[in-house]
Every structure is written in C-alpha cells, then in structure tokens.
Amino acid sequence: LSVLIVYAHQSPNSFNAAVKDVAVKELEKQGFKVTVSDLYAMEFKATSTRQDINGELKSAELFRYGEEMEAAWRNDTLSNDIKQEQQKVQEADLIIFQFPLYWFSVPAIMKGWIDRVLIGGFAFSLEKMYDSGVFKDKKAMLSFTTGAMESMFRPEGINGDINVTLWPLQNGVLHFCGFQVLPPQIFWGPAHCPHTVRTAMLETWGQRLKGLMSETPLQFASSKLFDLSFQGGFCLHPEAKKERETHPYGITTGHHLGKPLPPDHQLRAPPGGAAGTH
C-alpha cells in the first residue's frame, strides 16, 4: 500500500514537520510506501496559469483554465510538475494533507496544489463525483495545526463550529473527488502548549496511525438521495426530503434542511452508520 503526504510548512523544525515525520516513520514501519510532496521545498507553483499547459490551447482568445486543463490532461500536454503530482495521486491508497490552518483553510501553496492537480477529467467529472467519484477506492484526510484553542472552534466559541470550517475542504474537495474521507487529525494550538503536551500530541498521532487504514470514514449524503439531472437541479428527491422531516438533525453539516447540524459530523464517523448516508 502507498501513502502520499502533501505537506505545507516552511520550516523543517516546525511542529508540522514533526507530525509529518511521525507519520512517515510509523507508516513505513507498517510496510507502506510513503511519498512526501514537500510543497515549500519543491517551490511548488500555487497560481493557475497558461504555463500549466505545454502546447496549443483550445481557445487562445478566452483562456478558461478548467476547460483547457481537462483538454491538456486528455492530450497529455500538462506541465511536468502537475504530471508528477498526478502520478503520485494515482499510486496512493491514502493521501494525508499536513498543514497549519490559515484563515480557516489551507495555505495558498496547498490550495494551489488542489487547484492545479485535482483537475477535471483527472479527479472528477459530472458523471464521476461524490459517491461515484474518480477516487472512491482511495482514502484521504486532513491533519493540521491551529493557532486557536479547541474551545474557540466549538459551536459556542468565537470562531464558530469547526465542523462548518471543515465542510468546504472535506466535502467540497475530498468527498467531491470520491475519496473516502477519514476523520481529521487536529492539533489544537501547539504553539501555546508546553513541550510535554506537544510530545503527547505526537504520541497520540503515532498510536492512531497504527490502525488508520481500518478506520470508518466520515459519512456524507448518498448521491441516491438527489435528482442528478439539470431538470431536477441536482436537488434532494421530494420523498427523501419528506423522509427527513421526522429526524432531529439535518442530513449533513451542509444539507442541514434548516435543522440542527448533526453533532461533530465532520470530526467523526457516527457509530454503526446513519440513515440516508453511505
């Protein structure tokens, strides 16, 4: 089995580097082939530009990045740095994104990796998304540090619910491409913790890695609940909506249907599964 760690931190002496090193060591001990894309060390280009395509464009007059990249992927005319990352993705059974949380999201260099590598055709299409996604046989997860304390990201905390913060990345990127999304590994405020606490955080991560591949993924709304047509607007089937009326919670963090959010929906898989999910 193969693991790709997409890693974004500027310093090899950082806590993120230590987290990444624990993962490499533990996973290799288990017999995994581990590849690290150290984005800052690679000076990975974050911007989506014409330089990402070698050769002719479909339309030189109006450059549409998504369309041009999908055509370049089909024609094998993508730039070499993108091709190399896509090859790593194809070989990986699990991808771990390791980063410090910037502005409730990933650092720009990692967002650039997502924008340039996970392109149409290669990572998704209208027919192949969500449950039916291209990477439905692969797993992915976020592992990140925060500047905030955990209490600041609770529903009553000043930053709001971390489940809402994670929804765009975990549903809108990973699940959208079909990945089975493992619960995130969150290191709360390591810069403000004593050395003993940081050491304990790393030990906890090492223990989790021992059973990582057998974990139950997070659960998302099944595509079967939706009318996947332009006429139906890709919206919930009326009967699916009606069936949810008696439930105390919405289906997911995003498909809340005006109800309370399922507790910790983006942090852990519900025990024994849940209705209307996969």
Image: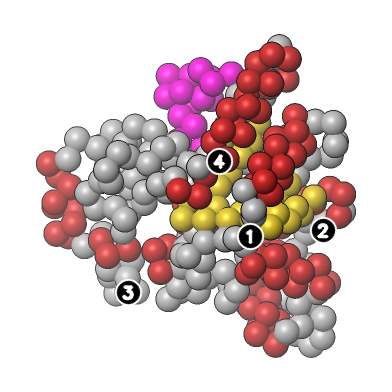
Q: Residue at x 66, y 41 (%)?
A: 26
Tell me: residue 268, above or below residue 55: above
Which mark is first along the chain, 2 or 1?
1
The residue carrying pointer 1 sits among few (fewer than 14), some (14 to 19) or many (20 or more) residues within 10 Å by Cα, namely some
Compared with residue 182, is residue 189 higher up or lower down, i.e. above or below? above
Category of crowding for the residue at label 4, using alpha-carbon neighbours closer than 10 angstroms: few (below 14), some (14–19), many (at least 20): some
Mark 1 or mark 4, which is nearer the start of the sequence? Answer: 1
The residue under label 4 is 210
Left or right side of 123 for 22: right
Total numbered circles: 4
Disc ID at residue 229: 3
Q: Residue at x 62, y 34 (%)?
A: 206
Indicate whether residue 98 is drawn in magenta: no
Residue 154 within the segment the image draws in magenta: yes
| Label 1 – label 2 distance at C-alpha | 25 Å
Badge nearest the viewer, 1 or 2: 1
Residue 184 appearing in the image: yes
Q: Which residue is mark 2?
A: 45
Front residue of 14/25: it is 25
Question: What's the CA distance linking mark 4 and mark 1?
Answer: 15 Å
Q: Are marks 4 and 1 in contact (CB under 8 Å)?
A: no
Of circles 2 and 4, the one toward us is: 4
Dots 2, 4 in contact, CB < 8 A: no
* Magenta highlight range: 148-165
Pointer 1 residue: 2
User: The residue tagged with tag 4: helix, strand or loop?
Assistant: helix
Amino acid under disc 4: Lys
Residue at mark 3 to residue at mark 2: CA–CA distance = 36 Å
Task: Say which amino acid is labelled 1.
Answer: Ser
| Residue 246: image location, x then y, percent | 12, 41
Coordinates of residue 171 in the picture (x, y in percent) = 47, 51
